[in-house]
């Protein structure tokens, strides 16, 4: 039986990776359902996140259909033990035993403007996304958390991943990259999921998962 002690990158970390990958695969199913719907949203991170969260991840009928009833999703929740305010907090049965035992997903937009610069949404993805984990702005009890990128413009996603990796190792070294953003394979029929590995300010190993959701055809200009 796995312990809830996640103080290091122990054997139990592999269990939490597997659990989080399962959750992420369900979130991808929700995105794929969204992609078949007709809707328009403002070019706003919170508006996109809320549409995904309120219409899908907090839809009890859908949660039952895709076997997601063991988890509860909350939005913009302040943390008890850090200064962070999480985009999406994922509560499981373990959270009732250990209050810090939850997963976090940070949401950010991506577009084609200044993708190689120290300003723009690529920079924001790192500075106000990945940094929130590596600088301990967010707690990371399991050492496993995630990012969802909302693409709001025409973009070659694979090429943009390469640019994010370059930025992390040149301009934004607080990313403390141990393994760059790398294509993953735990979700069937969905190409744009990745993982990276980092070291936080306490010298703990962190694994971050990255889902890239394309909403360019749903955004109001």
Image (cartoon, rainbow, N blue to C red):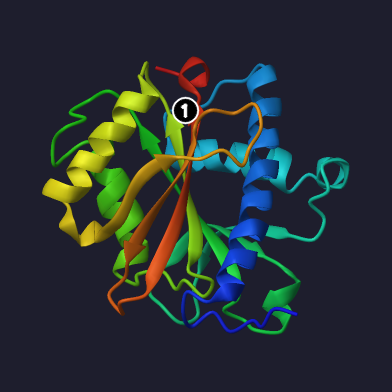
Crowdedness of circle 1 by 10 Å Cα count: few (<14), some, many (20+)? few
Task: Give the residue displayed 13% in from the left and 42% down from the top.
Answer: 118
Task: Give the residue displayed 52% in from the left and 77% down from the top.
Answer: 10
- Quarter of the rendering occupied by the N terminus: bottom right
Task: Give the residue displayed 64% in from the left and 26% down from the top.
Answer: 189
Q: Position of residue 215 (x, y in %)?
A: 50, 24
Q: Nearer the viewer, residue 37 or 172?
A: 172
Q: Position of residue 135 (x, y in %)?
A: 29, 69
The image quarter in which residue 32 lies: top right
Q: Mark 1 — residue?
A: 42
Question: Is residue 164 in view?
Answer: yes
Q: Is residue 122 left or right of residue 214?
A: left
Q: As drawn, which residue projects farthest toward the front?
A: 11
Q: Nearer the viewer, residue 88 or 11?
A: 11
The image quarter in which residue 15 lies: bottom right
Q: Position of residue 97 (x, y in %)?
A: 71, 84
Above or below, 175 relative to 192: below
Q: Is residue 162 left or right of residue 70?
A: left
Question: Is residue 171 in view?
Answer: no
SS for dot 1: loop
Q: Position of residue 202 (x, y in %)?
A: 31, 80
Task: Give the residue displayed 36% in from the left and 44% down from the top.
Answer: 181
Above or below, 71 relative to 161: below
- Quarter of the rendering occupied by the C terminus: top left
């Amino acid at each position: 039986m796995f312990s809830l002690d996640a103080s290091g990158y122990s054997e139990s970390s592999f269990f939490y990776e597997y659990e989080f990958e399962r959750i992420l695969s369900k979130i991808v199913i929700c995105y794929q359902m969204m992609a078949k719907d007709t809707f328009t949203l403002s070019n706003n991170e919170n508006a996109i996140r809320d549409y995904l969260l309120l219409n899908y991840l907090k839809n009890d009928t859908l949660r039952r259909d895709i076997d997601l009833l063991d988890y509860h999703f909350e939005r913009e929740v302040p943390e008890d033990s850090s200064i962070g305010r999480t985009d999406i907090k994922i509560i499981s049965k373990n959270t009732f035993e250990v209050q810090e035992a939850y997963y976090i997903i940070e949401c950010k937009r991506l577009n084609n403007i200044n993708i190689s610069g120290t300003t723009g949404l690529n920079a924001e993805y790192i500075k106000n996304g990945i940094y929130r984990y590596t600088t301990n702005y967010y707690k990371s009890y399991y050492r496993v958390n995630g990012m969802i990128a909302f693409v709001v413009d025409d973009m070659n996603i694979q090429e943009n991943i390469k640019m994010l990796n370059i930025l992390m190792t040149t301009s934004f070294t607080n990313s403390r990259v141990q393994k760059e953003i790398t294509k993953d394979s735990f979700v069937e029929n969905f190409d744009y999921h990745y993982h990276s590995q980092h070291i936080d300010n306490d010298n703990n190993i962190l694994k971050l998962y990255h889902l890239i959701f394309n909403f360019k055809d749903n955004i109001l200009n």
